[in-house]
Image (spheres, rainbow, N blue to C red):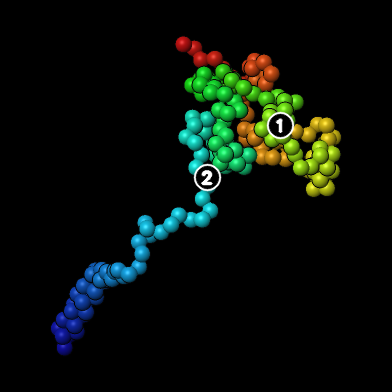
Amino acid sequence: MKRLRIAVCIVTIALAMTVLAAPPSLKVDKSAPLLLDDAPAAKTAPALPKLICYDCHGNFREELLALKHANNKITCVTCHGDSSAHASDEGNITPPEVMYARDAIAKKCQSCHKEHTASAAAVAARRQERGLQTMEAKDLVCTDCHGKHRMNVRVIHWDKNTGKLLGGGKKRAE
């Protein structure tokens, strides 16, 4: 009797191991479409131009102002020049070809965007209603409302009028 129990246990264990070890049979529904054939999702980010700028200025890949301009084939180069010396300077002491001091931003934007639908006074009042930083209408510039067209972290500072290095960069020893 004891041998019979042992034999039954051995058979049961062997059967269990066979069932557990065997993978389930694969059933393929040939009528289902392949995912590779599906259309891309409706909300995809616009294709940005492949610019070296994004290697260091990655925050602009998703910045609303940059995306809207990229959709209209307006790139970093359009406003800031080729800036190849800046892009190839690993020490990061060479400024971009064109920078805009705060007092020059509106004039640059207006070179393409001739009109704004709201007056500066109306914009200042709306900012105050929203509890945002209070500013005089005369002190507002386009990028105060339209995008955050700035680096998230700035370690290099240049005078935007002269391009002179103000701080943060270190010239590399040759």
Extreme front residue here?
A: 114
Of tags 2 and 1, the one toward the viewer is: 1
In the displayed structure image, the side of residue 8 where residue 104 appears, left or right: right
Dot 2 crowding, Cα within 10 Å, few <14, some 14–19, many 20+: few
> What's under tag 1, amino acid-wise?
Gln
Left or right: where 26 falls relative to 72: left
* Residue 61 position in % (x across, y down): 55, 39
Q: What residue type is labelled 2?
A: Pro
Tell me the tag on residue 110. Answer: 1
- For this view, does 123 lie left or right of residue 90? right
Q: Do the residues labelled 2 and 1 touch (CB within 8 Å)?
A: no
Front-most of residues 124 and 95 = 124
> Residue 114: x percent and y percent?
72, 34
Q: Residue 46 carries which label?
A: 2
**Which residue corresponds to the image point at 49% horizontal and 36% vertical from the top-left?**
49
Q: Is mark 2 on a helix, strand or loop?
A: loop
Of 152 and 15, the residue lying toward us: 152
The tag earlier along the polypeptide, 2 or 1, is 2
